[in-house]
Amino acid sequence: MDKSYSSFVRAFAARNPRLSLLAEALTKCSHWDKSSGGIGCIKFQGRKVAGSGATDLQQVISEIESLKVSGTRATGLCVLIEDIHPNEINKLGAVLDADPHFFSDHIATGPEYPDKRPAIDSESVLPSQIYGDGFVNLHYQRVIDLGEHSALRDIPYSLNLEGNSRRPVRRMPPILNRDVGLARACFSIMRKQFANETWICVMLMDSASSDIIFDPHDANEHTSTKFRAAQTPYRSHFRGSTVLPTYSSFLNDSIFRPQRSMNMLDGVLDSLLSISTESTEGEPSIMEMTLYPIRMIITEWMIYSLMMGRYVKLYEYSVDTLHKEIRSPDGEDIIDLYRWRRRSQQSLNKLRRMTWFIKQQDHTHHQLSNVLIEDIDHISGQIKQHAEALQTTIPILTSMIQLVDARRAIEETRYIKRLSYITLIFLPLTYVATLFSMSEPFALNDSGAWIYIATALPLLLMVLIFSSVSFQLEAIVKRVKHVCLIGPRTQNFTSTQLRHGLPYHKNVAGA
């Protein structure tokens, strides 16, 4: 009998559908990339860094086994893995006896729907259960620059990040001729305490350097256009990742060393090294270890909120320029607005989840927790305002489209009216010509041609007079019906208004 961690997940996936995604990934791991994006490891003795250097999973597993067997009190190990592979999930889950929901929620590729797949844990967990099992998964949105719009016209709405988790990327409407993408990302942390009072902390994060790809064969799309582009975030560097030097130190430094742009793995490693002290008492708290990732996620949410504001401006149409500004006559803009409504609701839920996690760590860092919660509340308020503005745009845009269609219908009615007048002119002439063509003497080169003229012109005049009288009678009947419905307060309408059927209201009491 197979006793691997993957078989354990598959056995419980039948009873817990939320593990089906993880079971599927562990079963088809041969189709995934060969390894993770990167691994880092730091040893702690109390609050002091005791060493680092493990860069592959086998070394990390050896460190964990040694920690569980011969580790001394307050000794800890922090393991960081970027873009984790299913094989690494299988080995790491077995050695840590980890809850499979930790991995399942991390590799979830997008919001699930009841008709396709059960909801993931982040969408179904209660506030009291966040970090109650010793782990938390923080999902967020990253804004990505896809490139020039002119080069991406044939690229569809749904893209993916190349990597083990294949995060979804949604192509948004262009802004200033630049296509924008929204990529789902996740940062997960799990902390376990062993029997000998040693501990381990595992942090999983996404790669910020994987390419954006689209393969029509994998996506079952009808287009044959393939796409690959480097991932270019809408930020070059996170302001809080390092401490900027002062101007005086810059002047005294003989060699200027520009700061390098770091991904999340390097940033978290640097932040963990910065909390080290000479004290061996106690151990780093969860808030201290996750401070840098949380600040980085808050920054990503801030950029996301600013981009929402740009799209609020994008959907400000006018009736006169609607036909030029709207992207598709099939209502594509309205579909995007409905997507923003759903996307805003999910974003606010993710921000609330992060707030709940921070509040649970409030007892160790009360002041810091309050500052972070204030930042999250500020961003949540902005997203809510933008969502309300976009929601209000939907009925306005629908009414404007209906108004434009009504204007177009009026123009077409005018053309039809002109065609009717032309028909009224030529129909009597054609009828008489057809009638007289049955005998020879009425041809234009014969002596009986005057009979055609004497017959056709009076008939044409009679038709025109009859049509005019019919229009006037129709207007009068409409006006009489209007007077009967409104009552005696409406009176004294002119012949011009009768002819066009336009009512003229005169209030007798106010005259």
Image (cartoon, helix red, strand yellow):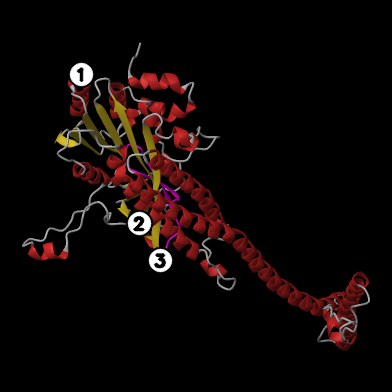
Q: Position of residue 56 (x, y in %)?
A: 19, 32
Q: Circle 2 sits in a helix, a strand or a loop, which is it? A: strand
Q: Is residue 384 magenta?
A: no
Does label 3 or label 2 sit earlier along the sequence?
2
What residue do we see at 38% from left, 35% from top?
Answer: 136
Q: Which residues are magenta?
A: 156-176
What residue do we see at 48% from left, 24% from top?
Answer: 16
The residue carrying pointer 2 sits among few (fewer than 14), some (14 to 19) or many (20 or more) residues within 10 Å by Cα, namely some
Identify the amino acid type marked 2.
Asp
Q: Position of residue 298 (x, y in %)?
A: 36, 50
Identify the amino acid type marked 3.
Leu
User: Residue 145 got which mark?
Assistant: 2
- Which is in the foreground here, disc 1 or disc 3? 1
Q: Is residue 296 left or right of residue 78?
A: right
Secondary structure that dominates the magenta span: loop
Does label 2 or label 1 sit earlier along the sequence?
1
For the residue pair 131 and 162, the one nearer the viewer reads as 131
For the residue pair 400 and 347, the one nearer the viewer reads as 347
Q: Quadrant of the C terminus?
A: bottom right
Displayed quadrant of residue 464: bottom right
Q: Determine which residue is flagged by label 1.
A: 69
Seen in the picture, residue 120 relative to 181 is either above or below; the reply is above
Q: Determine which residue is flagged by label 3.
A: 176
Q: Circle 3 sits in a helix, a strand or a loop, which is it? A: loop
Q: Position of residue 316 (x, y in %)?
A: 53, 67
Identify the amino acid type marked 1.
Val
The residue carrying pointer 3 sits among few (fewer than 14), some (14 to 19) or many (20 or more) residues within 10 Å by Cα, namely few
